[in-house]
Amino acid sequence: MDLSIIGSGYVGLVTGACFADVGHNVICVDNDPSKVESLQAGKVPIYEPGLEEVINRNVAAKRLRFTGSIKDGVDNSQVVFIAVPTPQAADGHVDLSFIEKVAREIAGVLSDYRVIVDKSTVPVKTGEKVAESIKRYNKHGAEFDVVSNPEFLREGCAVADLMKPDRIVIGAQSERAIDLMKKIYEPFMSPILVTDINSAELIKHAANSFLALKISYINAVSAICEASGADVEKVADGIGMDRRIGRNFLNAGIGYGGSCFPKDIAAFIKISEQLGVPFTLLKEVQRINASQKDRFLTAVRDALWVLREKKIAVWGLTFKPDTDDIRSSVAIDLVADMLKEGAHVTVYDPKGMEKAREVKEIAGATFAASALEAVEGAEALIVATEWSEFAAVDLETVKESMATPMVFDGRNLFDPQTMATLGFQYHSIGRHRVAPR
Ligand code: UDX
């Protein structure tokens, strides 16, 4: 089928590439001329495992191309996906101005029946607004249908998530649109759930909020484990073996970050308030998430007494491993907090250094060239992101390089027993402390 995707950001680019890979002809549209130019020159602006190969393969097969023109995209496709940013405004509500602008622009060039699909994460009832807007600016009176088709991809495994999704949600009200959408997704051979538009929109916010709730739940349990001497990983295994609960997203740590969870939870709270049914449980989810970082910093302070002038190494800056994304990263917040307290912080991340150098809150940090360089002379090491590269570092060498062998593991990457045997004073999240040998 002939498809266009408006917005070549994370979601748009991965979606476009994967649609092309299953045989559709795809036009990716973006209003940033430099982005379009670099994509046309074969440069992929984000780091996502496997994405570059998929893009190159499909550009070479002439199934994927990039343009700056919405008219080009709309004229040459049966289905037009909107995948533009929906950022968070200062008060938590979702800024829909990019969606509104694109809806108007599509309407202005619409000359024949098209399905307009919203892929961006939007508040419930946005589809109705998009339809109203297109109707208002629809110069040629062309027929159209609006569909909601939320994405559930995770950064770091976005290509795999898109090629083999758990489910495909299609929120639509016309059989014509549903048939076209099913045809697009047929090659993915995954379960399809057809709903009304409002339900599809709500599924996205409800799913992300539930996952965040799961993380905050286990993080709250981790605090109880620390206070009682239980082990959060054993507790997570034990409750996760119940198939109704499941073990995924029960990894305790310094809290969730990223471009989705913090924004989507704030948005869902706002949406529920606007609908007159405040979802106060989610405020507690936010509170627990913030307190996890604070509890961790308190443990660092307790051990080091004062942070001023202490040399602290931080491994990991991205909000999770296998991405270069540092948006709303707890690791960055930690570094900023310690710098404010006067610590000398040296940071290292396998993929996030370039973006981190642009963050003014951590401009005072030293950027090391490797994990081992970061720990040289350090009085404490903080593991803030669980990159597998860190798990593979020789810990004997780390210990020898450090001034004092103290490790604060915010992601439970290492085994407490092993760390104690190696002679580290080791603190992790919700697990037993073993005295160093
Ligand atoms: C998330 C959703 O998983 C995805 O379905 C949606 O489309 C976009 O938002 P993403 O932001 O890429 O994806 O990251 P995810 O893997 O969900 O992790 C989010 C945050 O939660 C990370 O900071 C991660 O470290 C943290 N996390 C995750 C935990 O602290 N514990 C866990 O058990 C799982």
Image (cartoon, grey):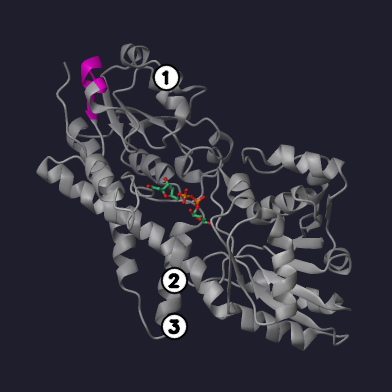
* Residue to which mark 1 is pinned: 393
With 121 as the anchor, is 253 left or right in this view?
left
What whole-number distance in Å separates the C-alpha atoms at marks 1 and 3?
Answer: 50 Å
With 88 as the anchor, is 7 left or right in this view?
right
- Give SS at disc 3: helix
What whole-number distance in Å separates the C-alpha atoms at marks 3 and 2?
Answer: 10 Å
* Residue to which mark 3 is pinned: 274
- N-terminal label among 3 and 2: 2
Among the 4 quarters of the image, the one containing residue 146: bottom right
What quarter of the picture does the C terminus occupy?
top left
Q: Residue 391 appears at what percent x and percent y?
A: 40, 25
Please name the residue shown 82% across and 69% down the image. 78
- Give SS at disc 1: loop
- N-terminal label among 2 and 1: 2
With 85 as the anchor, is 372 left or right in this view?
left
With 163 as the anchor, is 328 left or right in this view?
left
Point out which mark residue 268 bears. 2
Disc 3 residue crowd, few under 14, some 14–19, many 20+, Cα 10 Å:
few
Tell me the kind of residue under disc 2. Phe
